[in-house]
Image (cartoon, rainbow, N blue to C red):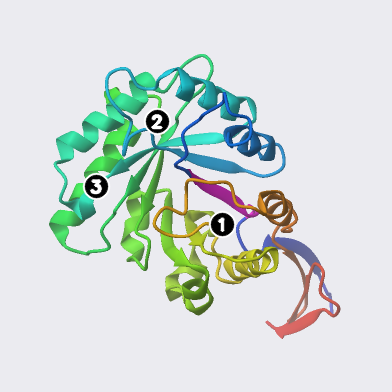
Amino acid sequence: MLMFLYFFSISTTDASSLGIIYPLYSYPNWYDSDSYIYDDVASAGQQVKITTIINPDNGPGGPSSPNGDYQRGLSDLSAGNVGMVGYVHTSYGKRDIEEVKSEIIKYNDSFNTANFNVTGIFFDEVSSSTDHQVMNYYRNLYDFVKNDIHSTNLDMVIFNHGTHAPSSYLDFSDVMVIFEGSYQQWTDYEPDAYVEAYPSNRFAAFIYDVPSPGDMKTSIDLAMSRHVGNVFITDDALPNPWDSLPSYWKDEVSDVAAVPLPSSALFFLTGSTFIFWFWGKKDPKVMSK
């Protein structure tokens, strides 16, 4: 009997490793080296993929925004290969959509220069409703960012639900923040079953009040086990946990950078039997055809 041996491989998950999405709600006071954190974030951009959320004034700010300080801060981030998206709140689909679009245009026109580029929008206070009108609201905003003549410098769309949200929102977003809460809440969190069916870089979690470097590492491990490919973890706490650099920032960057790429599987097809090997596993597994 002739026997044929075939080799092929697949990835067991998406090809990306873990990234950081940083809500950088801190003023770029570059003139005070002790409290200026944009340079710390920029330095980390050489080790891991970081996307920062820029938020001058609960949005892009007025006609003169970004001011000189923000221009300095954003230039530092850009020099560190750190990505930037602009903050826009939506009041869970109740904010006037034309107001939202005007802020998107502001980011497109005023936050793209020779020295720095905001290339997407972070929509905050995003509804998790499946109401047809609400979903059309967010679909409209997605199309505006992606395709409108007034947003040609923008492409990425991040939705901050902050909690569980229907998978249908993935049809008109690039990343969904499906958790925003404390470390204690994160340890008890269970993602929706559909999350496993999508690339992990489509999901993010913001975790605050994480006391120690060990707890931070546990939070990273939980993110990987839950198929969440973007995180921000801090020991800062409410009412605003996003206005300071985590005390263990360097450890966090190193731990995120150390997350291995997803494993691959090598398949052997021989006659009526599949044999496949997961890289890093001790023994091959055998499965009948």
Please state which of residues 275 and 185 is positioned toward the viewer in this rendering: 185
- Tag 1–tag 3 contact (CB < 8 Å): no
Label 2, secondary structure: give it: loop
Q: Is residue 283 above or below residue 87?
A: below
**In-image side of 225 versus 116 (left or right):** right
Res. 68 image quadrant: top left
Please state which of residues 244 and 184 is positioned toward the viewer in this rendering: 244
**In-image side of 275 versus 134 (left or right):** right
What residue lies at 22% left-to-right and 64% top-to-bottom? 129
What residue lies at 27% left-to-right and 63% top-to-bottom? 128
**In-image side of 106 versus 264 (left or right):** left
Label 1, secondary structure: give it: loop
Disc on res. 90: 3
Give the labeled residue for mark 2. 154
Please rate how many residues cluster around mark 3, counting C-alpha atoms within 10 Å: few if below 14, some from 14 to 19, many from 20: some
Residue sticking out furthest to the top = 114
Please rate how many residues cluster around mark 1, counting C-alpha atoms within 10 Å: few if below 14, some from 14 to 19, many from 20: many
Q: Is residue 122 above or below residue 18?
A: above
Please rate how many residues cluster around mark 2, counting C-alpha atoms within 10 Å: few if below 14, some from 14 to 19, many from 20: many
Q: Give whichever of discs 3 and 2 has the lower sequence position.
A: 3
Give the labeled residue for mark 1. 234
Q: Amino acid at mark 2?
A: Leu
Q: Amino acid at mark 1?
A: Thr
Q: Quadrant of the C terminus?
A: bottom right
Q: Of circles 2 and 1, which is in front?
A: 1
**Residue 236, image x, y percentages:** 52, 57
Span highlighted in magenta in the image: 15-23
